[in-house]
Image (cartoon, helix red, strand yellow):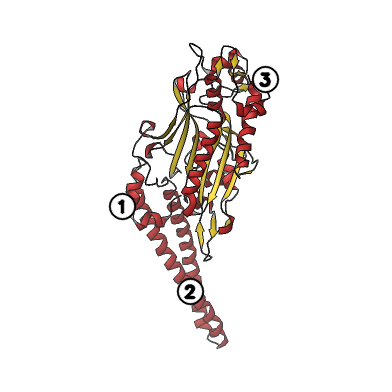
Amino acid sequence: MLTIKQLRDDREAAIRRLAKKGVDAAPVITEIEKLDDRRKAIQHELDECLATQNQAAKQIGALMGQGRRDEAEAKKAEVASLKERSNALNAEFKEVSDALQAAIVTLPNFPADIVPEGKTAEDNLVVKLVESYTQLPENPLPHWELARKYDIIDFDLGVKLTGAGFPVYKGQGARLQRALINFFLDCNTRAGYLEVEPPVMVNEASGFGTGQLPDKEGQMYHATADNFYLVPTAEVPVTNIYRDVILDEKDFPVKMTAYTPCFRREAGSYGKDVRGLNRLHQFDKVEIVQLSLPEKSYEALDGMVAHVESIVKALKLPYRILRLCGGDMSFTSALTYDFEVYSEAQKRWLEVSSVSNFESFQANRLKLRYKDADKKTRLAHTLNGSSLALPRIVAALLENNQTPDGIRIPEALIPYTGFDM
């Protein structure tokens, strides 16, 4: 969530920066300024009203002590009137504050200065390309046909048990899933990330804290009886560990990693891009999260990108790194790098990770703060990245490593799978 100060300090710059995300912020900022001015006026009147009320209350005792009963009764009537006015002002203050909050949360985060202009994925900037294609058999099979051929993923059984987008992994397919999760977690913990195992359901406050609510409630599975949400990513529960927490400068950086199943409705998704593992409603993902001092968050982002790249390299997959344009970025992100691996069988790039700096946007919603050297309370910065999402990694591993004799397992994974084909 942006702060009122960010919006009011340079109104035109705020409008210009949000336009890069395709948002016409001028009407909303005008409304925010009006509500903020009204809130301040109410607060000023309320303070004066309470001060007068307190002064009058003190005078009542003195008047009673002097036997000036009629004047004391008049003061009592004045205090009663002031209390009534204070109650009305408090009610109006809450109404205006709620409206102000509702307006602010509709605005996305400012994009960083280096975010490219653009509206769609076609406008994203390729910042690195590593091609390492393997020689595949003639007419290579897509992963959904390989899964059926080797009986390692059953999409039809998933439809029977739940519905489309909920595959069942079997035998070596299930073992490969477990191997990848453990491999990713080990890579992350070796890099200094603390492993945590969070709940996979969160409350509304957690969804608001990381920006999924109210922006993406239509994409989240909602357990209405308890008002809990199934997590779309481990970012939500892990970052919320520090909701309403005040840290010390010496506590940074905070680095955490977690594996969770992830649940996304993916409403409106259809066509060839959702075949097989390309887009699921339930999938496994390992996440990394960092909390950073503001002046070090972009250094932290570079480190996270390099870390994710090291894992993709270990899997020996062709990949590229994209800097997302303003129109393709998430609501909460200030700067995002996407990792895509190439599927030789599908002849397309598959996104497997997003690594983002949210600056203070999430921290403001979370009330995640720290005390600096001068004991001043400031907002921290938050970052997160997929390290990695499994479905498209599995798709690329199956497709890019197929041979006439079976599917090769990358050397780095063999200690985890226990088999090399």
How packed is label 2: few (under 14 Cα within 10 Å), some, or many (20 or more)?
A: few
Dot 1 surroundings within 10 Å: few (below 14), some, or many (20 or more)? few
Residue 128 visible to an observer of this rendering: yes
- Disc 3 or 1, which lies upstream in sequence? 1
Q: x, y (%) of residue 289?
A: 56, 44
- Residue pointed to by mark 2: 51
Residue 309's mark? none
Q: Residues within 10 Å of mark 3 (few under 14, many from 20)?
A: few
Q: Are marks 2 and 3 in contact (CB under 8 Å)?
A: no
Which residue position is annotated with label 3?
171
Q: CA distance from mark 2 to mark 3?
A: 74 Å
Sequence-wise first label, 2 or 3: 2
Tell me where residue 310 appears, x and y as whole percent.
Answer: 54, 36
Q: Which mark is residue 12?
A: 1
The residue at 48%/50% (across/down) is 297
* Residue at horizontal 49 percent and vertical 63 percent from the top: 87
Q: Nearer the viewer, mark 2 or mark 3?
A: 3
Tell me the SS state at disc 1. helix
Decide if residue 227 is on the left or right side of residue 342.
right
Residue type, label 2 = Ala
